[in-house]
Image: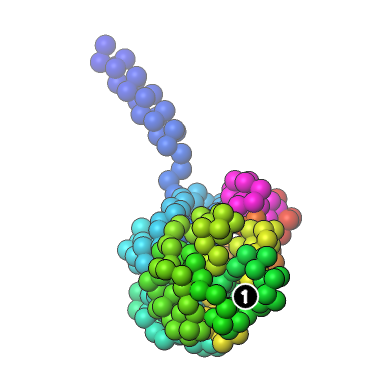
């Protein structure tokens, strides 16, 4: 009787453990918008393919400071970040226009937390102020300086953009840009819908947004160079890189493989074609590293 119970218990335990699957060796995180989730999925799949280890995903963590806290606390091991964002929002340093200088500053600044910035992925996702295409065609408007001399704008922006030091307040001051009432803040995924429905007539979007390439919008030139560079790279914990030989080399295989045009195409596959990020990531990796399939 007791032996039967013990045997049944062992079977139940074995089935439970089998259902749990392999324990993740590292955790990849992301902030809460399409490009971040897509990049994090590309990283997770690439690491799984190269190192043959189980990788956990903690996506949609929130904004920059939440993702940074997850990384420094060890809740995640790595995530993609943007150099200008790290410089101003995390390190609280003044904006700089030199991409190499910004990258050097953030690499040095992040050492205090035992974190490494790896080689950039290949694109610069700067903020991009966009207006209706019909407004740009009617006025011939191409720059933010020209926009500042025109109408007061019903401006839409993400929550983080309204608060960060390289965001809304500095932009309005740099260009003396006039707004029609208080700027409307919303989730990043709602900006283009708000522009299309005329809830707003200018949005603070991103230069690598996939929808920007297919919707009737015009990206205004930052002719006074207000925004710093936002080169995207992976930040990883030192202890994780030391614990997993080959991890750094695997991640840096992606360096330069994601220029602006490729990132826009991938983002559109998710936002415009409504394909799952995991599927888009797998297709990208299959095409980029065919020998590894």
As for residue 277 lying within the magenta part, the answer is yes
From the top left corner, tell me how far across and down residue 176 is, in percent. Answer: 48, 84
As for residue 121 lying within the magenta part, the answer is no
From the top left corner, tell me how far across and down residue 34 is, in percent. Answer: 54, 56
| Residue drawn at x 36%, y 62% as measured from the top left | 66
The answer to which of 171 and 100 lies nearer the viewer is 171
Q: Quadrant of residue 147?
A: bottom right
Above or below, 196 relative to 275: below
Disc 1 designates what residue?
A: 220
Seen as rendered, the residue at the extreme top is 1
The answer to which of 109 and 273 lies nearer the viewer is 273
The answer to which of 265 and 23 lies nearer the viewer is 265
| Residue drawn at x 67%, y 58% as measured from the top left | 215
Seen as rendered, the residue at the extreme left is 2
254 left or right of 203 in image? right
The answer to which of 76 and 230 lies nearer the viewer is 230
Above or below, 63 relative to 179: above
167 left or right of 201 in image? left
Is residue 2 visible in the rendered image? The answer is: yes
| Residue drawn at x 67%, y 71% as measured from the top left | 136
Stretch of the chain drawn in magenta = 269-286
From the top left corner, tell me how far across and down residue 82 is, in percent. Answer: 50, 72
270 left or right of 158 in image? right
Is residue 121 visible in the rendered image? The answer is: no
**Secondary element at image label 1:** loop
Mark 1 is surrounded, within 10 Å at the Cα level, by few (under 14), some (14 to 19) or many (20 or more) other residues, namely some
Count of marks overlaid on the render = 1
Q: In which quadrant of the rendered image does the N terminus lie?
A: top left
Magenta stretch, main secondary structure, is helix
Q: Quadrant of residue 225?
A: bottom right
From the top left corner, tell me how far across and down residue 238 is, in percent. Answer: 42, 70
| Residue drawn at x 46%, y 43% as measured from the top left | 22
């Amino acid at each position: 009787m007791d032996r039967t119970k013990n045997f049944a218990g062992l079977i139940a335990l074995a089935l439970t453990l089998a259902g749990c699957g392999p324990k993740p060796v590292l955790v990849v995180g992301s902030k809460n918008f399409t490009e971040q989730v897509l990049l994090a999925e590309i990283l997770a799949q690439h690491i799984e393919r190269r190192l043959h280890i189980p990788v956990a995903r903690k996506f949609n963590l929130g904004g920059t400071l939440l993702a940074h806290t997850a990384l420094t606390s060890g809740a995640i091991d790595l995530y993609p970040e943007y150099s200008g964002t790290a410089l101003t929002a995390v390190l609280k340093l003044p904006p700089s226009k030199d991409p190499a200088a910004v990258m050097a500053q953030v690499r040095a600044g992040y050492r205090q937390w035992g974190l490494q910035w790896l080689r950039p992925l290949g694109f610069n996702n700067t903020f991009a102020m966009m207006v209706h295409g019909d407004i740009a065609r009617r006025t011939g408007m191409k720059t933010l300086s020209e926009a500042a001399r025109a109408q007061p704008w019903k401006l839409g922006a993400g929550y983080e953009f309204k608060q960060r030091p390289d965001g809304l307040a500095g932009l309005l001051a740099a260009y003396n840009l006039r707004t029609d009432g208080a700027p409307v803040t919303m989730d990043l995924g709602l900006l283009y819908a708000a522009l299309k429905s005329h809830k707003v007539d200018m949005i603070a979007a991103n230069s690598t947004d996939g929808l920007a390439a297919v919707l009737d919008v015009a990206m205004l030139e930052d002719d006074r160079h207000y925004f710093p560079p936002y080169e995207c790279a992976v930040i990883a914990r030192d202890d994780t890189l030391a614990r997993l030989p080959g991890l750094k080399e695997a991640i840096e295989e992606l360096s330069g493989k994601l220029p602006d045009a490729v990132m826009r195409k991938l983002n559109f596959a998710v936002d415009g074609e409504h394909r799952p990020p995991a599927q888009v990531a797998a297709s990208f990796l299959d095409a980029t590293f065919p020998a590894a399939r």
